[in-house]
Image (cartoon, rainbow, N blue to C red):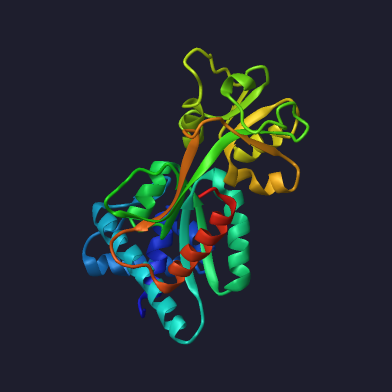
């Protein structure tokens, strides 16, 4: 704890790639950070950062050191959380890695959590599926929330939901009164889809019969844009029920599942299998699990 300031300096400089940028983020003098780094490099008798024209880059020694630094900072936060729990307070920091399509879901879930636990800092990072797995395994994120995450011996699934995948469109769309739809039913209409490489696109393409040529009118990696376009008849997009539950309840969108039981996605909340979560992260897991379960089909 006594060396926490130096650890934060190193972590921020490594992330920013610049002492000046790190100083601005930490609201301290750049000269103070530079002195600390130079002093440590002198003590270690080796450079931590390589001075490049475009900024700073970790040396091989720095790469080793920064792993220790970040692990120490994480343990420091956990320790503060445990100490606060003994006092009957809930405080600390929890980092959640998730997909762009789930940000809207998390905004509601975490807003409610913050009202209940105002001392807890929540950090949400939007990453791709493989990056989410890596962030959790490397300890860069405490929790991961994403679709179709691969099985991994070092990942523990705290919760998992199987939800319907379906067509999403305006409430006045000609298909809005259907109980379910086949992909062939959608072909006369302009289709808005997630771009290739996204888990949602892969899940949709599994529903396309081999005798149908899939020709989307719009492809995008922006889930919010997909929702906005779907609100204009006759456009159709594709999503899981969780992403559009709020809009469906408000009457802004309609959701009709694909026919058949195979048109489902797996949504999982994961954390590292090794060790147990601290008290604060465990409460976040319970809150997300309860809130998402209320939206998804279990």
- The structure residue drawn at horizontal position 23% and vertical position 60%, both measured from the top left corner, is 46
In the displayed structure image, the side of residue 206 where residue 244 appears, left or right: right
Count of numbered tags: 0
Report the front residue among 296 and 134: 296
In the displayed structure image, the side of residue 45 where residue 156 appears, left or right: right
The answer to whether 80 is drawn above or below residue 19 in the figure is below
- The structure residue drawn at horizontal position 55% and vertical position 30%, both measured from the top left corner, is 259
Determine the residue located farthest toward the right in the rendered image: 172
Q: Position of residue 83 (x, y in %)?
A: 42, 83
- The structure residue drawn at horizontal position 54% and vertical position 39%, both measured from the top left corner, is 164
In the displayed structure image, the side of residue 193 where residue 196 appears, left or right: left
Q: Where is residue 76 in the image (x, y as percent from the top left)?
A: 38, 73
The answer to whether 73 is drawn above or below residue 50 in the figure is below
Determine the residue located farthest toward the bottom in the rendered image: 87
Where does the N terminus fall, quadrant-wise? bottom left
Q: Where is residue 115 in the image (x, y as percent from the top left)?
A: 63, 70
- The structure residue drawn at horizontal position 47% and vertical position 87%, both measured from the top left corner, is 87
């Amino acid at each position: 704890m006594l060396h926490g300031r130096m650890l934060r300096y190193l972590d921020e400089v490594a992330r920013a790639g610049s002492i000046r940028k790190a100083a601005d983020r930490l609201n301290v003098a750049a000269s103070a950070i530079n002195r600390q780094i130079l002093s440590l490099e002198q003590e270690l008798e080796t450079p931590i950062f390589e001075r490049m024209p475009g900024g700073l880059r970790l040396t091989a020694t720095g790469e080793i050191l920064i792993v220790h630094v970040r692990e120490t900072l994480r343990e420091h936060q956990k320790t503060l959380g445990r100490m606060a729990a003994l006092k009957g307070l809930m405080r600390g920091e929890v980092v959640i890695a998730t997909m762009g399509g789930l940000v809207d879901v998390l905004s509601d879930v975490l807003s409610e959590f913050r009202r209940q636990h105002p001392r807890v800092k929540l950090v949400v990072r939007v990453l791709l599926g493989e990056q989410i797995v890596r962030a959790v395994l490397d300890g860069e994120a405490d929790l991961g929330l994403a679709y179709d995450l691969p099985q991994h011996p070092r990942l523990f699934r705290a919760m998992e939901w199987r939800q319907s995948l379906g067509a999403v469109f305006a409430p006045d769309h000609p298909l809005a009164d259907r109980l379910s739809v086949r992909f062939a039913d959608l072909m006369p209409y302009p289709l808005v889809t997630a771009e290739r490489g996204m888990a949602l696109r892969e899940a949709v393409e599994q529903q396309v019969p081999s005798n149908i040529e899939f020709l989307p009118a719009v492809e995008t990696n922006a889930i919010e844009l997909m929702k906005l376009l779907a609100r204009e008849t006759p456009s159709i997009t594709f999503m899981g029920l969780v992403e559009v539950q709020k809009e469906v309840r408000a009457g802004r969108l309609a959701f009709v599942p694909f026919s058949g039981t195979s048109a489902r996605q797996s949504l999982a909340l994961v954390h590292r299998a090794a060790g147990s979560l601290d008290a604060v992260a465990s409460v976040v897991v319970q809150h997300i699990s309860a809130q998402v379960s209320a939206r998804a089909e279990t």
